[in-house]
Structures are given as structure tokens and as C-alpha cells.
Image (cartoon, rainbow, N blue to C red):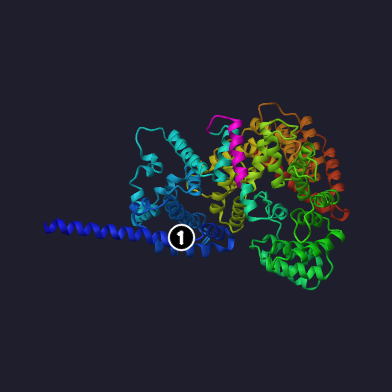
Amino acid sequence: MEKNIFIFFHLIILLLSFVYSKNNIHEIISKINITEYNSNCNEKKEHIHCYEFSKKIEKELSINSLEQLNSLTDIDKYSISEIYRNIGQIHYYGFLNKNPNLSLGLSYLIISSYLGNSPSQYILYILISNQLIEQIIMSKEFLVYLKTNSLLNEISKTAYYKNFNYTLEKNINIEDSRSSISLSFLFSSAIGKYPPALSTLANKYHKGYGVKYSCDVALQYYKESAYQTIKDITNRHTKNLYDYRNLINYEYIEKKFNEYNENADILEYYKAEAMKGDIKYIRELGEVYLFGSFDLNQNFKEAFKWFEYGYKLNDSQCTYYLGELYLNGWGIKQNYKIAFELLTIAANSGYNKAWNSLGYMYYYGLEVPKNIKRAYDYFKLGFRVENDPDSYYNLLTLLIENNKEIIPDYTTAYKYANSIAQHGHTFGSYFFAMMNYFKIGSLIDSCDITIEFFKETASRSIENKIKFENALLNYKNKNYRSSLLIYLELAEEGIESAQINAGLLLKNYDIFLDKEYQNYMAYKYLKMADKNNNIFAALTLGNLYFNGFQTIKKDYNECKKYYKKVINNIGSTKFYKSHAYFNLGLIRNFGLDDQLKNITKADKYFEISAKYENTVYFPYYIIKAYNLFKNNSNSNFIFTQIKKLLKRFVKPKWILFFYISLILYILFCISLFNQKDY
């Protein structure tokens, strides 16, 4: 009897402590503004503060068992999942010390995804689909975390954890299992309306990657992803400054950066020149702080300081930006009266973007009586004089919103939307896609075209902008693994620049232990970009087949297909065409494919290549000289070719030096050509 009473009281104490624990967790979580917390964690300069704060909360929560987790409300579970996600991503991407800890990062992301966190589920999709998760969970480091983290250890004993160690299961097809598991994570993330997951599913259905092709299904996913992007932008930004701020840098990472010094040095130079009163650098500094350039966070107070300086020097552009700061309350107390005065001065001084902002004030009745007609006239001034995309956008909004003062004109609105969508305006792209979708004033009935503009909108989300910045920053810091992991996420959404950057990182750097699979991944992402008709991808793939690369054998017939794609693409640059024609010339000159040599046809290719890129004449004449030497032809003709080359490039006093150098170079080229090494 006494024993039973003891057990009863012991259970009561346990229950009370459990209730206290549950209430304590809720109390801690309720003090956190999760939206603000996530926003701060996304800032480039806030990773350390985010990590320290998150670890502090994790310690206070002291969650050690699934029983504690499962008893919480859905809202508390979501908040906790975000805390685990942010800790996990900081380790996973190496934001803390520029050295990714994939094992520790994954341990947090698994817990977060167990709680239904959509971004964490998306990262797990990336790891599973690219066969990277097996390498991590079997590593010594991860096994240590598995033993020491009691919560992770409990999760590892559930059916949920089988998603990660499926390779240990017997009697299964690993490829099929991997594909179905990765898709299940992707669908789960999309159900949570996570925009990258929605875009990735859309891309899969649009291209037929791992699912049955369906343009209609792809359209619905892209539409939802674009809507989430617009909603997020609207909540965070004013419309007329967003597009300038959110242009994604599509610079291919294989090219050198256009920077002569470190950002800090450039900034100091700008400041020194600005203090001398150079208006160009005053403007530049203001914009650097306003838009958060040079890896800086936005600093509206600093922007205000420099734009005010420019305004005092009577610069109309600085006056306009100063008016925008007062209009939005950035770096200074919001003051519509001063904003209106400054914007009027800027507009009358010839800075025509200011007309759009004045129209905005009349539309909403800020400091001036609301006047839709005058707003419409000012928007027209903005687009007629400046061809300003924001003015176009505001005009088309007025033309379809059925207000009493402006007669609806869907056809003209559609033309405006088309015009600014072609220039990459985020809201314009979304408007144009929606008008096509609902067939409002639409002249086009095409699922593929509508998809392209929803896709463009979705790709320009604030989250993607932050990812691109972090990926590029990691690349600059030679942190190639972190850079790749971010590019992989963006690449899966169907963003061509990310697909190319992922492919180039995998091709050019040793990132993972399994080199053969890494080469396969490089090829896979370059092929994805090529399927999106990307010229750079086609050129790169052509070069891979031309030179051979790791497991990719030389295949001149295959490389010709890609070079012809480059040549026939309207958007191809002169440099790309020159490169493609020159290599086609080499193939014909030496009969590298299954066809015979044809020096006459090769010469035509070389001539076309040289027309696009003048510097090609040098190697072209070398090859002509080689052909003549090889065929024992008239040597006088050879020197005629050399003289042509010298006249084109060399001053008379250097001719003797170049004769000697050229002869040596020809002999060297002959040696290389005989070895078939081009």
C-alpha cells in the first residue's frame, strides 16, 4: 500500500514538473517576435548576434525529449523550429567562422524539419536529391552529435529518421528510394508555401525533371511562388524603390570581379573624394548606404547625411533621394511636407523620376489633396520623359483599377505591363503574368510565356537576393563549399545563373570527396541551364566535350551541337560566337571528328571568328603557317602571312624581335598540334 502511494505521488510530481516545463517553454517563446528575429538573422552582419541569441534561447528552453516537443502547441513548435533552423543554417553555410560544419548544421536542421519547418525540409530535399546526405550522416562528426544530443538521438529511433539512412535498408532500389524521399520533403516544404520549394516543383513540372511534364501544374506552382514573393516585398518595401534595391547580380563567377581593391578601400576612396565636394562620389556614397551595397547593411542615417550634402550643392538626384527618405521616414522622421518640397525641386530641376514620387503623393493624398487625375498626369510625365518603369507600373495600375477619374483601358495597361516586364521590373512581371493568366487585355495565350514572367517574379524574392549575396560573398572569400550549397538551392528553382555557378564551382574546385559524382553534378547543372537556352551553359558544355573533362570523354560531334547552339542564338555575344567558330575551325582543320579535314572550310570558320573578335587573327595566322609547314608548301607565302600579322599588330622597330619570337612560337605550336593537345 505504501509503495503504491509512493508511486502515485511520484507520478503527480512528474506530471506537475512536466506541466511547468511546458508552460515555461511557452513563456520563453512568447517573448520572441519570430518575424523580427528571422529578419535580423537574414542580415549579413547579424549572423553572430543571431547565433548567440538563438543559442541562449535553446539553453533556456532546455528541450531534451520528444515528449516535451510533442506536447507543445503548433505555434510554439513553429517558433522552436525557426530557432533550430537558424542555428542549423549558420553552421551549415559556415556563416559564423567561414567554415561550414555540415554535420552540426544537419543535426539542427533534422530537428527543425521534424517539427515541420518548410525551409529546413527544403535543404534536406537538396541534400537527399544530390546524394550528399549519405556522406554527412555516416561521418564520425555526425555520429558524435547523434550520441550526445538526446533530442536528435530520440528522433533517430523514429520512422521519420529512416528518410535519411535509406541506403541501409535491404531489398530496395536506392535510386527510386532517394527520388521518392527527396520529393516527399519537397512537397512537404511546398505545402508550407515556402517560395523556393514552390518554384522548384514548378521547374520540375515545367521541364519534366523526375515528374510527369505538365505546363498547367507548373503554372499553378509558379503563380503561388510569385504571389508569396510580391506579398513579402509589399510588407517590407515601398514599391517605387524596390526594383533598384532587389536586382539580382547575375555575374558568372568564372569571370574576374570588377574590383581593384577591397570594398573597405573603395569606400574610403569614395569618402575622401566626396569630402572634396565631388558630387559623383557624394551620390555614390548615398546610394551605397541606401541600397546596402559593398556587402554593407542598409544605413539610412548615413544615406541621409550624404544626400543632404548633395542637396546643399544643388544636385537634383541627391535632392530626389533626400525627398524619398523624408517620404518614407528612412533615417529621419517622416515629413510629407518637406518630402513634397524636395521632390518638386528635383522634378523641376530635371530629375524626372521625381514625377513618379509626386504622383504617388497625389494618389494617396500625402500632404496634398488626393487627386487621381493629377497623379495620372505625373506618372505619365515620369514614363514619357524618363521612361521610368515605376511610372509605367503606376499608370497600368490606374488603368485597370476602375476608379471614377480614369477610364479603364486594359489593352494599354497590358502594353505597359509587357514593356516593364521585359526590363525585369518585379511588379511589372507579376502584373503581366496575371493579366495573361486571367486574359485581361491579353494578346498572348501561352502557358510557357506566362510561366516565364511568374518565374521571373518568384526568382526576385528578398530571400533569393540574400542567398545570392551570401553565395557571392562566400565565393569571394574562397569558401567554395558554402557558396555551392547556396547556389544548389537557387539552381533547383530553375534560376540559370545559379545553375551555371553551381556547375562551375563543381567543375573547377575540389569540394566533395567523391570526385566522380562531383563531376556528374557539374554536368547535371550545366545541362539544366542549357535546357533553359542559356548561351554560356551551351558554350561551357561544348568546351567540356572539346577538351574532355574527368569522366566526360572528348566527343567532337557532341561539342559541335553545342557550338552551333551558341552561333544560332540571337542573344549570343560576339565573344561567344567567336569562340564557337574558332573551335569549329580547329575541328575542320585537323579532322578531329568523324569527317575528313577541310582546310578551306576551316579557314571560313576562322575568318568569321576573327570578324567577331579581332585578336583571333593571331592564332589563326599561326595555324595557317602550321598548315603550310606541314604540307611543305612555298615558304615565301608563310612569311607573307607573318608580315600581314606584323602589320596588323606590331610597330616597325619591334619587327625583328617578333620574327624570332614568332618562329619559336610556331615551332612550339607544331609540337603541340602533333601531340593533338589543343
**Is 641 situated above or below 366?**
above
Asked if residue 228 lies left or right of residue 322, the reply is left
| Residue shown at the point (87%, 56%) measured from the top left | 653
Foreground residue among 308 and 130? 308
Q: Which quadrant of the rendered structure holds the C terminus? A: top right
**Is 15 situated above or below 125?**
below
Q: Which quadrant of the rendered structure holds the N terminus? A: bottom left
**Is 546 situated above or below 250?**
above
Image location (x, y in percent) of residue 652: 88, 53
Tell me where residue 495 sits by quadrant. top right
Q: Mark 1 sits on what residue?
A: 30
**Is 358 situated above or below 638?**
below
Considering the numbered disc 1 on the image, is that residue within a helix, a strand or a loop?
helix
Task: Report if residue 569 is visible in the image.
Answer: yes
Tell me where residue 412 sits by quadrant. top right
Image location (x, y in percent) of residue 465: 63, 52
Give the residue type that dot 1 points to: Ser
Foreground residue among 212 and 344? 344
In magenta, the rendered stretch is 210-228
Question: Would you call the spot at circle 1 few (<14 residues within 10 Å), some (14-19), or many (20 or more)?
Answer: few
Image location (x, y in percent) of residue 449: 69, 34
Does the magenta segment cover residue 217?
A: yes
Asked if residue 122 lies left or right of residue 139, the reply is right
